[in-house]
Image (spheres, rainbow, N blue to C red):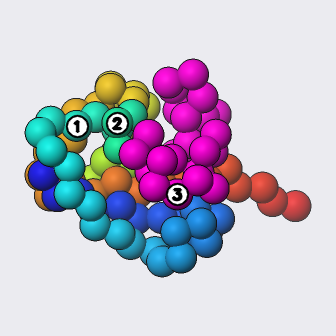
Amino acid sequence: MELTLRLFATFREIVGTKTITREFEGPQTVAAVLSALEVEYPDFEGELLIDGDLKPQINVLKNGREVLHIDGVDTPLEDGDTLSLFPPVAGG
């Protein structure tokens, strides 16, 4: 299955581009894809998942819909889906 990953702010800096496409074998979940990113990009380690769950204040959208309102990190993914990853945002 092919997925498009859109990255924002500091996540974009880690990867070095705003969009990447990745191929995955068989059915995948948000957790599996985020775990794969942490392996591929060591700077992501501990930035996306904590104890198998989404790190607080990280926003992940599947095709524009927040995964926390679907099945969280267990949200299933399908060929052609887009995941958008937003880091915590601080303002002042």
Q: Secondary structure at mark 2?
A: helix
Of helix, strand and loop, which one carries label 1?
strand
Q: Mark 1 sits on what residue?
A: 28
Mark 3 vs 2: CB contact within 8 A: no
Q: Are marks 1 and 3 in contact (CB under 8 Å)?
A: no
What residue span does the magenta drawing correspond to? 34-60
The answer to whether residue 58 is magenta is yes
Q: Which residue is mark 2?
A: 32
- Indicate the quadrant where residue 70 lies: top left
Mark 2 is surrounded, within 10 Å at the Cα level, by few (under 14), some (14 to 19) or many (20 or more) other residues, namely some
Quarter of the image where the C terminus is located: bottom right
Determine the residue positioned at 28% across, 34% down: 29
Work out whether residue 64 can be spotted: no
Hey, what amino acid is under mark 1?
Gln
C-alpha distance separating marks 2 and 1: 6 Å
The secondary element bearing badge 3 is classed as loop
- Which disc number belongs to residue 41? 3
Q: Nearer the viewer, mark 1 or mark 3?
A: 3
Report if the CB atoms under discs 2 and 1 are less than 8 Å apart: yes
Q: CA distance from mark 1 to mark 3?
A: 19 Å
**Mark whose residue sits in front, 3 or 2:** 3
Give residue 4's quadrant in the image. bottom left
**Is 13 in the magenta?**
no
84 to 59, vertically: above or below: below
